[in-house]
Image (cartoon, helix red, strand yellow):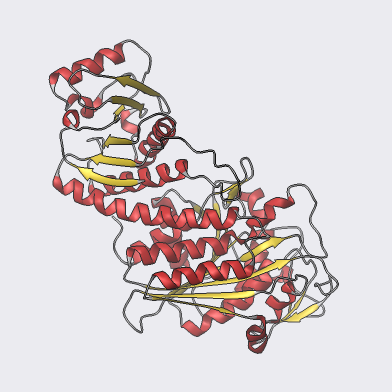
């Protein structure tokens, strides 16, 4: 989709569909009142017929409206005027886009409601409209021989603003929204691919493609022999059960000052997780291709950083492997030695994500990070605790935790902090090793984070458990989260978010 802004009077714009908001109770609001007398009267007359009341989700498509040059006018319900937010506008536009994409209209124009008064409101609304539109238009059909796509898809959206200053804010938000959406779509594509295509080597090749696109991004992928020399016994113990070789993907984006400490993002890249010897139930095991969504979100975020040329240094690390049952696979009771030198008793081979992450987190030390955030589909317990709406957040630094929480709130990609203290850490005590890889039935999300915390004592660190938010079981589709949260955090660090 191509996006642009204009300050043209709405009734004079030549477009195949003009989108106007209406508030609940058939109240036209300032958008319709700002139209010239004839156009406003025609639309108010249409509203009086009662086909829409302005409730959220409602749309009304009109043709050849007097006084308006657009071929069509779509009225969208915005709900109560006092409840108007960037999120409610984006949701309403998403419904309109879905309908228009199946029509003959190939371009549309949205009038930003004048009720959005501040620059922050305009920025958030514009950005969220882009994210909602791209999310609704996203299709994954790479593996289908026949592509079921609209014959005349929607390809262009113009945002009509009331002044040049608002237009400038909107243009900035459009650039941010498009880069974030592009990163989300890359993450979705990688996650939706089946495990026989999206292997650790394939993930590495996709990361290298980004490195070739951007001159200030360096990409490498460590082989198993290189990891063995580094002492990554935890990570390599997981890959032993697979014929696919593991990779440690390292992406270095240098957009900031030379020598400034980078933000390091570490994403779990299990391209398929059968559970190993502690094999998972067969029902819905196909969804375990999504166990690399953390790694996919890191790759998507690095792409968005590079597209915007953010003035910050960011390192992405993706430990990638498969977890399958095999004669060489980990067995319950095995003890392995991590890169940090800590020994780990493997009580459950399905708790493998933390094994590959712990070595990657130790590897992150060499970058002398300003902060490290790991992202992982780590525990089913997080789905029980927070459902599919909110990402789990745990951290060893209050300021970093608050930074991530505020970023999630600002971009509608929420996370919620859970406690992490010595009482939980004791659940990982082992009779035979420095620590066990599981902590029993209770507080599984927290004990998993406590395990990772044992390898992050040398820097500020936060953990995002995206097991409930990375994909939707209902329609078997990746969400691209938490690319928005991560990008909002980085934009705020660069002082570029409103």
Quadrant in which the C terminus appears? bottom left
Q: Of 39 and 116, which appears nearest the observer? A: 39
Based on the displayed image, in which of its 4 quarters is residue 308 positioned?
Answer: bottom left
- The residue at 35%/27% (across/down) is 76
On screen, residue 26 above or below 292: above
Q: Farthest residue toward the top?
A: 49
Q: Position of residue 81 (x, y in %)?
A: 31, 29
Q: Is residue 417 visible?
A: no
- The residue at 28%/49% (across/down) is 123
Q: Is residue 329 visible?
A: yes
Based on the displayed image, in which of its 4 quarters is residue 326 positioned?
Answer: bottom right
Q: Position of residue 59 (x, y in %)?
A: 39, 24
Asked whether, in this view, residue 342 is left or right of residue 182, the answer is right
Q: Of 271 and 440, which appears nearest the observer? A: 271
Asked whether, in this view, residue 215 is left or right of residue 424, the answer is left
Total labels: the figure holds: 0
Q: Farthest residue toward the front?
A: 145
Q: Position of residue 135 (x, y in %)?
A: 46, 45
On screen, residue 242 above or below 91: below
On screen, residue 275 above or below 216: above
Q: Of 139 and 126, which appears nearest the observer? A: 139
Q: Position of residue 23 (x, y in %)?
A: 32, 25
- The residue at 14%/43% (across/down) is 163
Asked whether, in this view, residue 36 is left or right of residue 255, the answer is left
């Amino acid at each position: 989709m191509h996006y642009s802004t204009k300050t043209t009077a709405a009734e004079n714009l030549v477009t195949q569909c003009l989108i106007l908001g209406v508030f609940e109770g058939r109240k036209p609001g300032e958008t319709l009142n700002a139209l010239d007398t004839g156009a406003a009267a025609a639309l108010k007359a249409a509203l009086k017929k009662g086909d829409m009341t302005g409730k959220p989700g409602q749309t009304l498509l009109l043709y050849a409206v007097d006084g308006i040059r657009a071929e069509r006018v779509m009225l969208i319900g915005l709900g109560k005027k006092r409840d108007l937010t960037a999120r409610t506008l984006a949701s309403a536009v998403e419904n309109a886009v879905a309908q228009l994409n199946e029509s003959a209209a190939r371009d549309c124009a949205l009038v930003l409601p004048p009720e959005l008064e501040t620059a922050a409101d305009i920025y958030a609304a514009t950005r969220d409209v882009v994210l909602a539109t791209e999310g609704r238009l996203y299709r994954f059909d790479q593996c289908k021989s026949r592509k079921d796509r609209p014959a005349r898809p929607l390809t262009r959206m113009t945002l009509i603003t009331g002044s040049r200053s608002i237009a400038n804010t909107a243009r900035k938000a459009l650039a941010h929204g498009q880069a974030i959406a592009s990163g989300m779509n890359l993450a979705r594509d990688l996650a939706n691919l089946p495990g026989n295509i999206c292997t650790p080597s394939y993930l590495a090749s996709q990361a290298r493609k980004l490195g070739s696109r951007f001159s200030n991004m360096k990409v490498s992928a460590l082989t198993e022999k290189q990891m063995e020399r580094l002492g990554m016994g935890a990570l390599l113990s997981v890959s032993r059960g697979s014929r696919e070789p593991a990779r440690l993907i390292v992406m270095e984006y240098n957009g900031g000052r030379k020598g400034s400490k980078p933000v390091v993002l570490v994403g779990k890249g299990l391209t398929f997780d059968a559970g190993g010897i502690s094999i998972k139930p067969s029902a819905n095991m196909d969804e375990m291709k999504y166990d690399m969504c953390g790694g996919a979100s890191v790759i998507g975020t690095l792409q968005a950083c590079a597209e915007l040329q953010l003035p910050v240094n960011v390192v992405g690390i993706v430990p990638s492997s498969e977890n399958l049952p095999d004669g060489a696979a980990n067995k319950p009771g095995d003890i392995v030695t991590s890169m940090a030198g800590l020994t780990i008793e493997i009580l459950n081979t399905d708790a493998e994500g933390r094994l590959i992450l712990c070595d990657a987190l130790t590897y992150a030390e060499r970058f002398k990070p300003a902060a490290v955030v790991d992202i992982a589909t780590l525990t089913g317990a997080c789905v029980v605790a927070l459902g599919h709406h909110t990402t789990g957040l745990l951290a060893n630094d209050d300021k970093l935790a608050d930074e991530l929480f505020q970023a999630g709130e600002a971009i509608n990609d929420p996370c919620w902090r859970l406690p992490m203290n010595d009482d939980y850490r004791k659940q990982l005590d082992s009779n035979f090793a420095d620590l066990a890889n599981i902590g029993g039935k209770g507080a599984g999300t927290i004990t998993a984070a406590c395990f990772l915390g044992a390898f992050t004592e040398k820097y500020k660190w936060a953990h995002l458990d995206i097991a409930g938010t990375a994909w939707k079981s209902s329609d078997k589709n990746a969400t691209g989260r938490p690319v928005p949260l991560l990008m909002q955090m980085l934009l705020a660090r660069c002082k570029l978010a409103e």
